[in-house]
Image: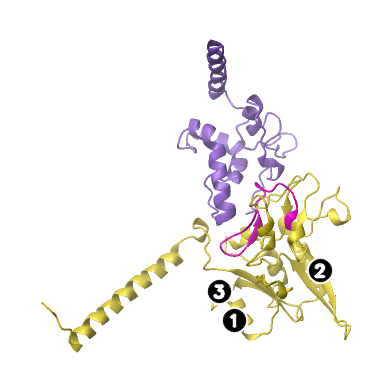
Chain colours: A purple, B yellow
Amino acid sequence: MYRLVVILMVLLVGNVFAERHADYSNLGEEASNIKASGKIFHTDGLDVIRKMHPEFLNHKRDKTHREGVRTKENSLKGCVNCHATKDKQTNQYHSINDQDQFCSTCHQKVSVSVDCFSCHRTTPRKGTK
Amino acid sequence: MSKTLNRRDFIKTSSATTVGVATIASGITLTTFAANTSDNPVTSEKRWGMLIDTNKLTEANIDGMVSACQQENGWGSEVHSTGDQKPTWVKKLKVQDKATGKITSLPLMCQHCEEPPCVDVCPTNASMKREDGIVLVDKHLCIGCRYCMMACPYDARSFVHEELTDQREHMPRGKGTVESCTLCVHKVDNNETPACVASVNSDAVIFGDLYDANSNINQTLKKVQSAQIRADLDLNTGVRYSGI
């Protein structure tokens, strides 16, 4: 039984790490530009943001909502603005939680639903605060 | 080793102390002004409020306030909600004096009470009051039980009955949660005035810090007669009215 658990765990962990080097075709317009220019936005490392982004977002939401701290750091708006992709034909943004868009690629794979976007806007709207 | 303090020494010491305090005090003031407000948590040194003069407001002004709120916060275009289900963050209300028959129109929204009943009854702490007096719903915690809607004496809160898309970037709204006037908290945090106040753009509606003795709202409230709606409930509302 113990062996079975170990094997299962190895398979699961393997899955997570397999995702690590996947090439994101839908990284998002701005994020792709940043990547192409060689700059690093997530300076703590991609592993950190991948693992910890729910905690970062939860912490920020409480700071913003309850204490009025409206900095750009870890803002969900920032995630959407950077990682949204435009449809080349219609020139409209895809919703970031649509199938095969930035959030969904991983979330679908690990079967974790994203609740953010039942209330939050799913596409960037520049110029609004 | 007893040292007696003569008059000259006393004056010297006390004047030095005064200069010291003044230096420190001016330093503190400068730092406060230099800091970006949105980086710091809000404090109870401020209490945001609004003074609405119904004598100066026309009905068109009030309609303008409602549509400015809709435009700013993105409510009012719900297609599947019917009648009472439709969200209303601010509404035009008509009150009639029984003796004279005089009709007064006023805009009614969340009154941002100091002792909000909606916060008292909330089972999940979603209904909350910020330190600076703005009453909000934390939709992350809201379970949609609607106790707060029943507790509110002003009927200021609404429940979202349908799935929404294309929300305003600064104002997340979603099915199954309660919402109400936020005093345009996203604008207030950026040192702007709420959308409804900006739409009137006259001294008929004044927004500001009730505690700040130099603010327009504080000074006006000292001069003119004003009232809180249902003052008998002793909720100490942040939204005040004059002319009713």
- Label 1: chain letter: B
Residue on which disc 2 sits: B92
Q: Residue B211's mark?
A: 3
Assign a secondary structure to mark 2.
Answer: strand
* Residue in the picture at 67% in, 49% down: B139
Q: Amino acid at mark 1?
A: Gln
| A5 within the magenta span | no
Q: Are marks 1 and 2 in contact (CB under 8 Å)?
A: no
Q: Position of residue B144 (x, y in %)?
A: 74, 48
Q: Position of residue B218 (x, y in %)?
A: 59, 78
Q: Residue B144 or A81: which is nearer the viewer?
A: B144
Q: Residue furthest bottom?
A: B7
Is residue B175 shown above or below B216? above
Quadrant housing residue B19: bottom left
In the rendered image of this protein, does residue B98 appear above or below residue B88? below
Q: CA separation, marks 1 and 2?
A: 27 Å
Which one is earlier in the sequence, the residue at label 3 or at label 2?
2
Describe residue B165's horizontal placement relative to residue B115 as left or right: right
Residue B157 visible, this angle: no
> Is residue B180 among the parts visible in the rendering?
yes
Front position in the image: B111 or B203: B111
Range of the magenta residues? Answer: B127-148
> Residue under circle 1?
B219
